[in-house]
Image: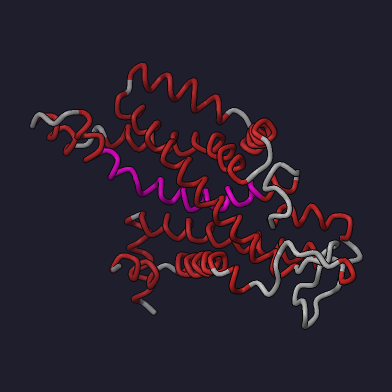
């Protein structure tokens, strides 16, 4: 907790990003209590009503409350972001760290064939391909984004493992007779987590944006589940007569992406000893 307090106190970017991220997660968790209406309930006589006291964000083409759907869309985005980052991060960390630690033909196989093959294609196109193959649905979206997202974490983990395995404490552990498995889990993995953590925070924003893209294309969550991307897709035909249908889900998406990007930038600066000392010096000079 002390490290968190120091991070919040001295990092302005981290403070803003952490606040926005925590608020987004709280809104997502509390959506069933915050939403004034059932997000899937249709009321055709009240379709396309502008924002009013009864419907703060207005209603969509089926008379559904936009505020309720935006709140429930936050649940989908946070769920996908956390699931994808955890799944892709764990898979990429283990594969990349193993390749960097073992080296030789294992590193050649993983780096040249697996990682480069996945990184050679645009990630969103691979995600669209896998999502189309697996079919729409929340679980399939998570699987598709994990499959296409692990390579970035693997490359970062491999580079860090190549550096850490040459350090003195790893050589000392080998001299004392420690096994490769012990060295890997005791010395390699714990010392390469910091940059992977920063990548994970930025990856949250990318995962949320990718889910919205897939939902916009009809490859994401199934109707009537609320999703920001699906809401933007539904609003295309009412861009001029009901622009609020675009504005509110777009603001929610912008909030989520900005929050995790700022948090990732703040963590990156804080975990760099040189930048951290500069931030502390600037804080003390006020």
Q: Quadrant of residue 164?
A: top left
Stretch in magenta: 188-211
- The quarter of the rendered structure image containing the N terminus is bottom left
* Image: 158 above or below 194: above
Q: How is the image coloured?
A: secondary structure
Q: Which residue appears farthest toward the left when viewing the image?
A: 176
Q: Decide if residue 179 is on the left or right side of residue 199.
A: left
Q: Decide if residue 255 is on the left or right side of residue 281.
A: right
At horizontal 64% and vertical 33% (from top left) the residue drawn is 134
Q: Nearer the viewer, residue 190 or 285?
A: 190
Query: Is the magenta region chiefly helix, strand or loop?
Result: helix
Q: Nearer the viewer, residue 225 or 166?
A: 225
At horizontal 61% and vertical 36% (from top left) the residue drawn is 123
- The quarter of the rendered structure image containing the C terminus is bottom left
Q: Which residue appears farthest toward the bottom when viewing the image?
A: 53
Q: Decide if residue 51 is on the left or right side of residue 149.
A: right
**Is 32 colored magenta in this rendering?**
no
Residue 104 point in image, percent of width and height = 33, 18
Residue 117 point in image, percent of width and height = 55, 24
At horizontal 48% and vertical 57% (from top left) the residue drawn is 265
Q: Quadrant of residue 102?
A: top left
Q: Nearer the viewer, residue 38 or 98?
A: 38
At horizontal 35% and vertical 61% (from top left) the residue drawn is 276
* Image: 144 above or below 255: above
* Image: 187 above or below 101: below
Q: Nearer the viewer, residue 211 or 276?
A: 211
Residue 153 point in image, percent of width and height = 45, 39
Residue 198 point in image, percent of width and height = 43, 51
Could you tell me how many numbered marks the image carries?
0
């Amino acid at each position: 907790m002390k490290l968190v307090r120091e991070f919040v106190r001295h990092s302005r970017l981290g403070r803003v990003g952490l606040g926005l991220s925590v608020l987004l997660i709280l809104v997502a968790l509390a959506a069933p209590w915050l939403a004034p209406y059932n997000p899937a309930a249709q009321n055709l006589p009240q379709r396309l009503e502008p924002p009013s006291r009864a419907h703060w964000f207005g209603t969509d083409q089926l008379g559904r409350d936009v505020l309720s759907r935006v709140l429930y869309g936050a649940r989908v985005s946070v769920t996908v972001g956390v699931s994808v980052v955890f799944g892709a991060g764990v898979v990429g960390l283990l594969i990349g760290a193993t390749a960097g630690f073992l080296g030789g033909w294992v590193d050649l196989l993983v780096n040249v064939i697996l990682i480069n093959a996945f990184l050679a294609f645009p990630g969103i196109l691979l995600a669209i391909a896998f999502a189309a193959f697996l079919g729409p649905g929340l679980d399939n979206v998570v699987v598709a984004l994990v499959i296409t997202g692990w390579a970035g974490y693997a490359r970062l983990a491999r580079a860090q493992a190549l550096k850490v395995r040459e350090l003195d404490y790893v050589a000392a552990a080998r001299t004392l007779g420690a096994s490769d498995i012990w060295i890997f889990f005791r010395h390699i993995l714990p010392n390469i987590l910091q940059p992977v953590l920063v990548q994970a925070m930025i990856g949250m924003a990318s995962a949320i944006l990718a889910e919205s893209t897939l939902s916009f294309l009809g490859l994401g969550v199934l109707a009537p589940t609320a999703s920001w991307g699906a809401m933007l897709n539904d609003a295309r035909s009412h861009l001029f007569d009901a622009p609020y249908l675009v504005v509110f889900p777009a603001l929610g998406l912008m909030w989520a992406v900005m929050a995790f990007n700022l948090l990732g930038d703040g963590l990156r600066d804080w975990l760099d000893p040189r930048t951290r000392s500069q931030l502390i010096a600037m804080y003390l000079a006020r």
